[in-house]
Image (cartoon, rainbow, N blue to C red):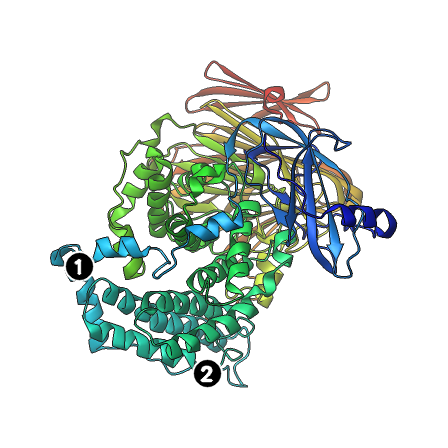
Amino acid sequence: MNILKPTFGLSCLAASVLTAVPFVEPSPSADSWGFRPAEGEVSTITPAPLVWADQKNAEKYEVQIARDKEFSDVVMSHERLVNVWCPSQVLPAGKYYWRVRFIGKDGKTSEWNTIRGFSIAENASKNPMPEWEELRSRVPKGHPRIFVRPEEMAVLRALPASDKASYFKECDKLLANPPPTEEIKPYPPHVKRPSKQWMDMWWGNRLYTMNALDSAATLAFGYLLGGKPEYAVLAKKILLDCAKWDPKGPSSMTYNDEVGMPYLSRFSRTYDYLHDYLTEEERAICREVIRVRGIESATIYPKHFFHPFGSHSNRRWHFLGESGLACLGELPEADQWLQNAMDVYFCVYPVWGDDDGGWHEGVEYWRQYLERFFWWADIMKSAMGVNIKDKPFFSQTGYYAMYIQVPGTKDGGFADLSQNAAKERQGLLLQKLANLSGNGHFQWYADQLRNSFPRESLYIEFITRNRKPIAPVPPDNLPLSRLFRGNGLVVMDTNLRTAANNIQIQLKSCPNGGTASHGYDANNSFVLNVAGQPVLIRSGKRDMHGSPFHRGWMWETKSENNITVNGKGMPLNTLSALGRITAYSEDGTFCYTRGDASSAFQEYVSQYDREILFIRPSLILVVDNLNARSPSIFNYHLHAVNPFQLRSQHDFETENEGGAAQINLLLPDKLLWSQTNRFTPPIREDVKVVHHHLTFDTPKPASTIQFVSLIQPFFSKNRPASFAKPVLTEQNGFYTLRIDLPEGPCEVLLRKNGFLEKATFQGKTFQRQNAELSK
């Protein structure tokens, strides 16, 4: 293997002996990405990207990778200006060690940091990051550069007029009805967050800005296609009008980044497409706008490399990358902006997902963020030849939507805005993933939603219009459940083709993200969907992110199908409230999983394990074991769209538009119950939503509790004449549960105050010991 040699020089090495300063390694914290690879980590990508804490006053870093702890066999060494590095050469499978040190602005060299050992897995995906000089050399010297290269533009321009007619028709509409470009106004003093007026202005200003600058980009691209000169005239007018907006005013990142981000990206795109039409004086005006706004946007660095969990930062970085690409060679800051974007992609992204393809912030934010990221993916591929298919995440993540939102499913499961997750837009994203990966399952899913695909920016649609669908493959050969272990989510289904015939239960216990950001749901929560309708739900509807209702209800454990202790739940919206999936198995009849929320709930309990055993298609067992730190009242919460019809704790049900469930809270007996449709605190008055909340309380304090719930889901049109009655016996510290289901008798063995052990049904046997996951 070629060695990437150190560049510090002998004088620095000698000086370090005399003047070494400490390399500060912050105590592990939930808001940091951590030193990566961590000690003992097995990387499924080669080379493994390296990440470390940025050091105060560091001028540059030296990083080394060796085959031995003594670093007598250094295989790679490199100088870096930022606190991440993805080498340009692959590492063969095997064991390695890495370390880093820095030279400060005062010329002093630090000690090496703690040496960490890691491994490259056999058959690891190859994803080396080309050296910056190589990446830079691939970028066209001329314009355009964003989505399309000059030589590709020439091919597009030569297309028959009939291929371009519909595009020009839309440009003509803009000529006839140009978008307004008056600068957006700040919030009046009487308009306060989180009022509806504030919300309308906050989001309305975003839409207004996008309408203006995306129209300009559309017109500018139309001119490049060979359209009327009037297209360029109007595009320039819009661009220069928007250039007059105050960069520190209401369109700034600081004031409203939902305006600042689209402003920066669309302004940069329009500048790129109009570059050769503008005078040098006009280009200078535009570059100064991009420079000032880009500098404000770049304040995410270097923090984002080591603390990458900021939600909006996870799209700001690639919008700034567009600006760097548009102005490369024209602004001194552009090199760093583009290089930083490539470092984020190779070393950090995606922070909310891993090789399983899950997404901590939920299916709606998965869609929103990846939809935008795919713009950057197309830009990287066109401008620099970087293909995202080399990251395992992108070959798996389509299954995240396929399992959560089986076609026809109304609800998106956990996390913010999941109740109105845009399934049609997910179809568009699955189409892109299918084209990228060649996965026929993704193509099949996209085809189910094709008639409702949304529109994208006209120039993006035109550039990508010739990407042909691949052969669809129905999901019939897929398992009926999926574990997204990195995000602590298990999704169990009975039918992956259509929600009308599907029963679905999901369990969340998240080791990566906890209850932070938009994935704030408490660990060990579950939801139940039947016939595509939410039956047991995560209650509430976001009136505005961070509002009193959002914080005081939706972030709270009490709003979920979950358990609180003395009315107290898990810590709110924090990366430190971690859970994990500790067991999982699937055989087509039995699907089993267990979540451990003890760490997230450690202030009140030393144990909180929740087991779910789905005995398809008729019975779901939910078993909870909790040990409180002191005698406590335990509160068992369930939520539904419509009222629970309660005959006793052993017989109650709820129904919603064709999906229903009968529930028996089998253990413990003699619980106290209450039902209400009130939210505490109340939701904003103009947001109309009613949900029903059923709570069972233990009658007296206890230190140890075991809840056993039997859920019999059913389709309303096929309501059973009667529900199977369980028979529970106890012997030698075990419960035996027998129940005659419509498909045949079922028997379950359960340890008292312990885990499920065994189940038999239709000649099949489930053994819990076979489901345990390694740590």
Please state which amino acid type lies under the numbered disc 1.
Lys
Mark pair 2, 1: CA separation = 37 Å
Q: Residue furthest top?
A: 763
Between 464 and 109, the one lying in front of the other is 109
Q: Residue at x 20, y 58 (%)?
A: 157
Q: Residue at x 47, y 13 (%)?
A: 763
Q: Is residue 295 visible?
A: yes
| Location of residue 97 by image quarter | top right
**Along the line of sight, the residue nearer the viewer: 125 or 700:** 125
Q: Which residue is mark 2?
A: 185
Residue 759 lies, in percent from the top left, at 56, 20
Q: Where's residue 583, x and y in %?
A: 60, 29
Q: Is residue 258 above or below residue 646?
A: below
In what element is the residue under mark 1? helix
Percent x, y for residue 522? 61, 48
The numbered mark, 2 or 1, whose residue comes first in the sequence reads: 1
Image-quadrant location for residue 630: top right
Q: In the rendered structure, are the residues bearing label 2 and label 1 in contact, judged by CB atoms less than 8 Å apart? A: no
Is residue 741 positioned above or below 662 on the image?
Answer: above
Q: Residue at x 65, y 51 (%)?
A: 83
For badge 2, the amino acid type reads Lys
Question: Is 295 left, or right, of 401 in this rendering?
Answer: right
Residue with the mark numbered 1: 164
Quick one: label 1, few (<14), some, or many (20+) residues within 10 Å? Answer: some
Indicate the position of residue 135 as horizontal and vertical percent values. Answer: 47, 49
In what element is the residue under mark 2?
A: loop
Question: With 501 as the anchor, is 232 left or right in this view?
Answer: left
State the quadrant of the C terminus.
top right
At x 18%, y 65%, the residue is 168
Point out the image quarter for the N terminus.
top right
Q: Residues within 10 Å of mark 2 (few under 14, many from 20)?
A: few
Q: Is residue 361 visible?
A: no
